[in-house]
Every structure is written in C-alpha cells, then in structure tokens.
Amino acid sequence: MDKFKLNIFVCNGAKIPRSLKNLKYKNIAYINYDIKDENTLLHIGLPNFVTDVRHLSNNVKDLLEIASFVYAADRMTYRGDINSVEYNKWSRSFHFIIKVRDFEFWNQSTVKIKLSKALKFISGDKDFSFTFEKDRPIHENDLFDKEEFKFNPINKIKVILFSGGLDSLSGVLDSLINSNNDICLVSHKSSQPGITHTQKEIVKRLKKDFPNRFEHYLFKCNLTRIRAAEETQRTRSFLYSCIAFALSTAYSKNEFYFYENGMTSINFLDRQDLINSRASRTTHPQSLGLISDFLKEFNPKFNICQPYFDKTKTDVVEMFKILNKEDYISSAVSCSRTFLKDENHSHCGGCSQCIERIFAVYSNSMEKYDGELGLYNFNFIKDDIPDEVIKNQIIDYVRLALEFSKMNIDNFYSKKLEDLELLSGYVNDSNEDDLVNIIFELVKRHSNQIETAIDKMRMKYDKPFKENAYTEKSFLNLVKDKSYFKEPIVRFVEKIIQKINTSIPIAYKNRKPFNENELNDFINALLVHEKENYEREYPVIKFSNVKTIPDHSFNCTDLLLESKYLRDKISLSSITDEIASDIIKYKNYNHLLFNIYDPERKITNDNVFKKDYEINKKCTINIIR
Amino acid sequence: MGHKRNAFLPKSKRWRDIVFQISNYSIENNNISLIADNILENVKDRFKLIENDKGVNTTFKFLLLLSYSTRTQNPHNFLKENGIELSDNLTPLQITKSLRIWIDEKVDSKEYASFAKSAAIDAISYWYQKNEYSQSNLFEAKQNQFNVWEKASNGTGFCDLSRKYFSKFIEKYLKYFLEREASSNSSSVSERESLNKNLEKYVENISQHSFETSKITQSYTAGWYNKYVIKEFPSDKKIKEFISIAFNKLRAEFEREQKNG
C-alpha cells in the first residue's frame, strides 16, 4: 500500500519546525504569495479584486491568502491514478505553516479546528492541520493596502456566487425580478476561456435587461510556472466562499447566496468507488454549514444561504418558465468538460452536468430552448453514446432515480442512513422526522421527474411506425425494455413461461400428454439447458412428518416449478387444493411457478383463478392451453 | 458542482479479465460468483492490511461496545467512558452520528474506514429493521431505547450482527471494483440492475452459509462472544484476532463456493 505521506506547505517565509523536518514520509513545498516576487508559484487575481473593495481587516486578508494556499496545495498534490487498485492516495494529509498578520486570531484552537473540519469534509482528505506564525512581512505597496477604491457600498445588496450555470443564473434572475436588491456577482475566472466568455456574455445581457442593478467580480487564482498535478480541485469552493465572504464583509452583509439545487448539492453516490468526496461535496449542506460555522469566528451573525436546496434540477429549469425568461437557458453553460466540445457547440453533451441538464429540460418539455438550438456535441438519447465513461454516467444517473422510485419512506431511511446523517442539522431540520421528510420528498420528486423525462424522450423519438428511430448504442435502447422494474427472479420466471407456453401447444397439437409425468418430461427437456443448477424432482423438502419433492427446481435462484394437468375426471377443486398445499410446504423458497396445462378449458376465468394465489408475490400461476 | 470522478479498473491482465467477465454477464448468464471470486483473488494481499486497519477495528469495536453496553447497569455511562457519546434519543440515525464522530480520528486508510463505517451503518439499520418491526415508524424512538441492542448481547445475536457487518463490508469492497466498469459493460439498465442485485444476493447467501449454516463459524463466533465478551469486554488484540478469523472464513467460503460452483 502507498505510505501515508504528510504534505507540508511552508508559506509566506515561515520556518519549518524540526519535528516536521525529521518526519520519514513527507513532501515539503514552499509557497510565497508576494506579487513582487517573480518566482512565486501562485498567482491570485486578488489585486484586481481587493482594489475594488473598501477595507479588509487583517484576519480577512489572511483568510484570502490561506484559502489560496490551500487551493494551491490541493492542485500541487496528486491524488493518484484513476485506475489504481485502491484509491489510498486520494485522501491526503496536509500541514500548513503560514505567517499571518493577525496571529492572535488564527492561533485560537477553535479557529484551527473549524477550518480543518470544513476542509476535510469538502475535500475528502485525511487531515488538514495548521501552524501559524507571527509577523507576516508586509511589503511596500502591498496588494491589500491600496487606498483607492471604486465601489461604494450599497445597503440593499445581495452577494451571489455566480458560475454561469443554470442554477446560479436562475437565482440571479429570481433575485433581480422578485426583489429590489442590487446584486453583487462573484465568479471564479476559469483557466478555460470558454467559461469566462460565457459568464461575460450573460452579464452583458443581464446589464442590458437590468441596468444599474449589479456588479460582477471575477477573480483568478492559479498556479504559475508549474503544471498542476491534480485537477479535481475539491477545495476551490472554499476559496470561492472566502472571496464571497470578504466581499460580503466589505459591504457589511451577514450572508452570501449559493444557488444550487438540492439533488446536485447532496450528490448521492451512485457507485461505491465515489466515497470520500470523489462525488464532490462543493455545495453539500454540511460543506456550507461547516464553512459558515468557521466564518462565524469572524462574524458570529454570518450565514451562507442556499435558497434552492428544496429544488431539483427540473425545478430550476422550470424557474425560467415561471420567470418568463426561457430564452436565457441557452446562454447558461452547465458543462464541466467544455474542453471536449467542438467549436459549434457550447456543451460536450456527455458529462454529468450535461446529462442532468438534458433530463431536466426534457422533463419540462423545454428542448426548444436548449438541445434543439444545437447546444450539444451529440444527442445520446437517439444516437450512439460515444464512450464508456458517458455510458457509465448515464446508466448510473438513471439507476439512482430508479432506486428512489422503488423506496418508501421507511426503507429510504434505512438504506440512506449514512447520507441522511451527513445532512442532519444542516437542512433546516429541527428533528429527524423533518430531515427524513424533506429529503425523501426531494428524491421522490426527482425520481418522478426523471421518469417523466424518459417518457418524453420516448414520445419524441420512439415513433411506432418509424424504423431505426434510435441506434443500438443509444440511451433509448438501454431503457427499451422496462424489465429493470422487476426482480431478476420475476424476469427469469417470465422467460420460462414464454418458452413453455410457446412449446407445449405445438408439441401437443395432435395428441395430449398421457399423464402429468409425460408433461413433466417435456418441461424437463425444455428447461434442462436453461440455467445452471436445474434439477428434476429435487430437492426433498421435509414438511411436518412427510417429505415432498417439487417437479423441477433451479437451485441458483431458489425457484421451484410444479406442473398440474387438468384433464378428464381431475377436478378444478383438487388442483386448487394441491396448489394451496404446495404454497404452504414450499414457503421458504424464493419463488414458486405453477404450470397448469388446461387444454379442456376447465378454468373459466383465468384472472379470478390466479388472483388469490398471486397476492403472494412469490407465486406465479401460468395457465397453458 | 455535482462532479463525479471517473474510475477504472487497473490495466493489468488479471483486472482486464474481470472487465471481460463483467461484459459477459447477462440476466441469463449469471457469472457473478466467478467475478466476485476473481476480484477477491486479485486483492487477497490487501486483506492483511484490512484486518489490521485501525478504522476497520475501531468500527467493529463500536458494534461490540454497543451490544455489550446493555449488559451494564448504565449503558449510556459505559459507552461514554469508552468515548462514545450517544444522544438521549437513541435512533439509528443518532447511533450513526455517534459512530462517525467516534471513528473520525481513528483512521489509517480512509478507503477502508469508509467501507467499515458504511458496513456498520448497514448492520445497525438491519438490526433495527429485524428487531423493531412492531414500530409504526423505524425512526421513532422507543421507551427503553437499549432493548433492541440487548438482543445482540448474546452469542446468537452477536453472530447475526457480525455476519451482517462482514458481509456488507465484502459487498461494498466488491462493488468498489465492480461498479467502476459495470455500467459501461452492460447492455441495458435492466442488466445493470440485475448485476447488482445478484451480487448482493450472492454475498448475503455466502455470509449466511458461513455464519449460520456452517456450524463451524457459528459456533466459533458465538463461542468467542460467550468466552471473551460476556464476562469482560475483550482487549483490542482479541478483537483484531476475531476480525481476522471472520474475514478468513468468509473468503474461504467464497473460494469454496466458486470451486463447487
């Protein structure tokens, strides 16, 4: 196994203690954030940012640097290969030694504990620890100490984090239309020019539609002179939040807003390998709660608000309809892999964000504002899914919705206990009932909306009289048979029934079997190659004082088959008694299939005959003629 | 936001063989026992690390403390003395919270600790479902809140609880590998659903056979509990020994099943 290394980052000219120097398994890196230093590894676009705000206290200036160092360390420390046997390298341990301006503040144990707790949860890393030193060198013309400021604080201002995606855009429009607040948008200036371009275009349009209502702050933070070893950037949201906090503080606000729907925020695991924050927790309620808790050390009244937590992605798309701003949809970019899109499209069409958006748009029947405008590289609904990663994501996305669709509130509670615990206390829940009800209602709504979306996709492309409406490797082909709603045993039983019901009428077209044994010989011949562990007249089952043997069995699935031949003087009531008796005797088996050959139509109403037996879901009655 | 990291199985032949076996899986061709056995064979060296992992040991100790606490005069106090803070409202969710807090700082590998924690949570949930069926709501608190755990404080109850813990651990560990490439190698959502269901059922059957049908493990587990736990809470060394034997017996059962299959 990989050794658990400690990654030590020495920042702003701090000194590394001897105890850490002597550690056996360690990496040491030095980062200084000095804009005058040509050799700095870290470039933060803070100069432009801080020249725009009025005054930042020393501990907030330190905060911005600390968040940037954490982000830089995150990007400089590799989390291992995606095809490792185990992902033990994923969870790293960090120790930061940082010179700060406000040593008294940062050296408080509560501050360190809360900072570490928030970062560990967001990143999925094993540990973050901090040593702070006094006397951060303050250079002449320090970037935080400029006197000229452009912006005058306005009372009714709302600070919103703005990514350029559907959720944050909907939140901005919602705020502009439904309140008289002025808006301060905070964005990360991405290294991908396409995203920055998108944000600027949206802002341009918003400025036109809502003149003099908002300001937009873009900040840049990236490594310089070295290539980032790690692209996952789980701590970016922490940096993002610290910038928004600094701005809110400058405007004397006690909160900022993160518009993100609840399903995306929770980001339920749909694969076991996604543990430890490999399914990101950027806006998970606990992430925002822990960051809020840490920021309360600066301002006890401070809060991060997440107004769209009770919404799904479909609800967010519906907001554009409600706000009468559908035409904004195409300008929002949700794609996380814009580098994969071709020049004619704004979205790759296959990343998890694109998939989520496409389902939400279909669920609202709003394709004409989205996919029909040619936003996506390809249409996975009817065309070939181009690679395995995309296929994985689509299937797993649908499977999760399917899993929720089958749950009632009790088994949701027991199966999703771990997820619920992570949310407990962070979603306006005053008790467990509240929590379970809030989240269960959300996942059920999401699941219904995904089902609606699939229905609408089918209606659009799967025309009854049209051949080749979709390709063999398309999404619609993956869901064409709805048997995923049934248990595997039920599907297997259906397969056997189909085989028996097709073969017996042909085999006995001219002559009926002499007796039940002959009928069983024929069924034996049909089933013998169907599945491993098939047995004729096996096993011996003890019931009370007697032993009984079923006609056929599949041990691998715990399926027993009994045949009944209704003929001549054999009465329907005797068969009825036999079936009832067999059900009692074989009650410990997974499923019972009764094949009743009724060539003389002694059973007059099949449904009435079957109904009382099939109330027990473990029993199927198959009538053959 | 809402990112999920892509994951693949290693590129070596023995792992590619497993991908091939996954692609051969179908509702009609249930080869899950072969896939599970081969995955376990590929990671057999890791089990020594798992058995010695602090997170795995600590998590199991939590279950043991919980069941043992009902033998003491004041279970709350006993657990507190051992570092476990439980709220007055003893629900599965509150126990889950205590478990997470308790093991948070007692971790070697975060990966193993996550499987262990999830497996223990599933075992807790299973235990409540099995022993509190008369309640109208699973998440309602009971008057004597430790009643449900009393049933785990004898040889038979402990055998059942540990079986669930170890089988869920193995199930999660198998899925950790299998699910990286299962969906991309399935021909339909139905097939993918069936793969998971059959895996869960297979692991459950193996664990039941190992802990219940096979008298060797059952008597060992119950005997171990009666000998080392009932009179006095066992040492960490004894707990580690038990975990090692339980994993070994389960793994042997997988091998046996595959050979006989």
Image: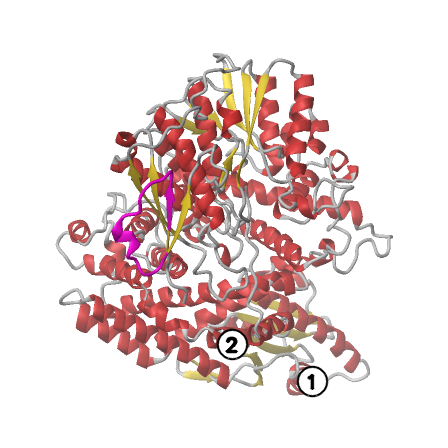
Q: Is residue A619 magenta?
A: no
Q: Position of residue A515 (x, y in %)?
A: 67, 86
Amino acid type of the residue that numbered disc 2 sits on in the rendered structure? Asn
- Residue tagged by mark 1? A522
Circles 1, 2 touching at the beta carbon (< 8 Å)? no
- Residue A557 in view, yes or no: no
Q: Chain of mark 1?
A: A
Callout 1: SS: helix
Q: Of residues A324 and B102, which is closer to you in this image? A: B102
Q: Position of residue B4 (x, y in %)?
A: 55, 50
Q: Of residues A451 and A276, which is closer to you in this image? A: A276
Seen at 19% across and 57% down, the residue is B69
Quadrant in which residue A191 is drawn: top right
Provide the residue span drawn in magenta: A8-26
Q: Marks 1 and 2, how far apart in space?
A: 38 Å
Residue A239 lies left or right of residue A518; in this view the side is left
